Amino acid sequence: MKVKNLKLRNIGIIIPYDGNVILDENGCAEVSNKAAKLLLQNSTQWVLPTGEQMPDENESGGNDPEGGEGDPTPDEIIAGIKALTLEEAKAAAKEAKYPVEEWEKLKSKGLLTAYLVKKYKETLDPEGGE
């Protein structure tokens, strides 16, 4: 997959199903077919690199080394979020389209990653009932 935003190069970002992936100097990342299909259908920020075809969700590929359902666990995703640098966390918040006024004042890595973890946990339990 290739990201359209020219500023997103040589950084790690969090992708649905695959968790933390690294964008190379061309803005490309190896992602699973399931994640690629989701990104292409639901985001205008991602395109297929030249010569690539729309992925078949049942084929193996991307970051799934065993070719099966290697979805990361919530704990693995949270660990990936906590491992982000401040700049990566800002890029993740922008990519997720979280309201800028909620996170722009968070100047430390710890606060911003805690905010991202909180937002991620909200997606696990959208009802908010704990």
Image: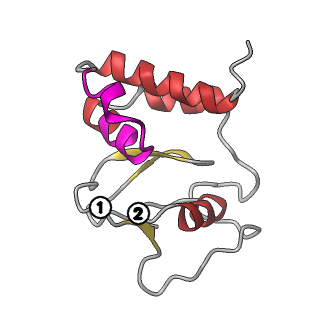
Q: Which residue: 54% across, 59% down?
A: 31
Tell me: residue 29, above or below residue 82: below
**Residue that appears at 47% across and 75% down:** 48
The vertical placement of 90 against 3, above or below, is above
Crowdedness near tag 2: few (<14), some (14–19) or many (≥20) residues, C-alpha within 10 Å: few
Residue drawn where x is 51% and y is 82% of the image: 52
Chief SS of the magenta region: helix
Residue 16 place in picture, x, y as percent: 58, 48
Q: Secondary structure at mark 2?
A: loop
Give the CA separation, mark 1 to mark 2.
7 Å
The quadrant in which residue 71 appears is top right
Q: Dot 2 corresponds to which residue?
A: 45
Nearer-N-terminus badge (1/2): 1
Q: Secondary structure at mark 1?
A: loop
Mark drawn on residue 72: none
Residue range highlighted in magenta: 90-105
Q: Amino acid at mark 1?
A: Asn
Q: Amino acid at mark 2?
A: Gln
Asked whether residue 97 is drawn in magenta, I would say: yes
* Residue 63 in picture, x, y percent from top left: 57, 55
Residue 81 or residue 101, whichever sits in front: 101
Find out whether the residues at labels 1 and 2 contact each other: C-beta distance under 8 Å. yes
Residue identifier under label 1: 5
